[in-house]
Image (cartoon, rainbow, N blue to C red):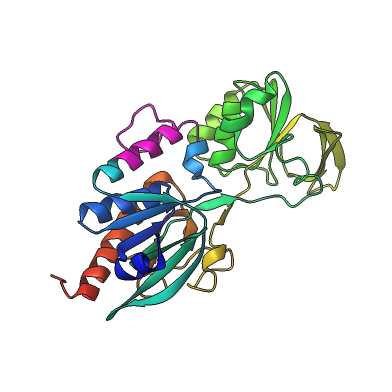
Amino acid sequence: MTEQTVSNSPYDVVIIGGGPAGLTAGMYAARADLRTLAIEGGSTVSQITATDVIENYPGIPGGANGLELVERFKAQAVGFGLETASGDVTAVTRKRFGDREGWEIVAGEQRYAALAVIIATGAAWRHLGVPGEERFIGRGVSFCATCDAPLFRNREVVVVGGGDTAIQEALYLTRFAKKVTVIHRRDRLRATAILQKRAFANEKIVFAWNTVVEAIDGLDLIQWVRLRDVKTGEKKELSVSGVFIFVGLTPNTAAFRDLVTADQGGGILVDANMQTSVPGIFACGDCTAKRLRQVVTACGDGATAAFSAQLYVEELKGVAY
């Protein structure tokens, strides 16, 4: 796309992100007859694609595979006229198109233009920040049981975390691993009751309460982790072949920190209409500052963001109802 094409023909809405929030926003915007483009990350993927089973999405009893569900979202949105592209967005800057103000979005070598922008970049798994973690990523350290569990068949692994994702992934790992040790820094889980019940009933899962990982080590692959009891200070080593880390999320918002207001954790601050601190820029899903990060809440955010962007664009064009 050339600079001339960008300047003369801006999209009504450009959505940055291709997960549930972004695709729902794309579906609603395209269905409202707005010329809409969704830019999917070139080097990142939506977390839903690495989720084995989503069992609490309304209307799908028995659950659905995350990758299959997001592909259905995309097909439905494209069916309404959503255009898609791929690339990592590195900048969003203000740009004027005749008598209207809009935005230029830089993604790799491409530049796109829009009257309104919806940021839906999701979040990435938070790291522990302990010695050996970065070194062994891909060699025993993983942030996706669905992706890597088959590599640990009949081996012992640990899962770090105590929330829904940690326990759900621990349960999935029991299909392959010989033993799964859940390491949690507190003496009780945050996970929902039904997941806790399943985990406590699973003979392959054991718990290391009030415990944190201090180091991950081995030769070419992981061989052990060093643990510390946060109450007694006692340290010990545990022989394992894999470490699966689920200790929270960091919003993928680095490219927008100087553009819109965010909280200390990087979550973009939005109002009830998904409006950010900058008119014409909206945000939705896991990249925003919010309490609950689920597929269903991301979809709701996306629909709201698209409707708000629609009203903004119509006002800008002078065709508001």
- Vertical arrangement, residue 79 with respect to residue 281, above or below: above
Residue 230 image position (x, y, % from top left) = 78, 49
Count the numbered circles shown. Answer: 0
- Vertical arrangement, residue 273 with respect to residue 245, above or below: below
Residue 240 image position (x, y, % from top left) = 78, 30
Residue segment shown in magenta: 51-75
- Vertical arrangement, residue 76 with respect to residue 311, above or below: above
- Vertical arrangement, residue 220 with respect to residue 15, above or below: above
> For the point 55% across and 40% down, which residue is it?
165
Q: Residue furthest bottom?
A: 99
> For the point 68% across and 46% down, which residue is it?
186
Q: Residue furthest left?
A: 321
Quadrant of res 184: top right
Position of 23 with respect to 177 (left or right) is: left
Residue 126 image position (x, y, % from top left) = 63, 51
| Magenta span includes 137 | no
**Residue 298 in view of the camera:** no
Residue 206 image position (x, y, % from top left) = 69, 29
Image quarter where the C terminus lies is: bottom left
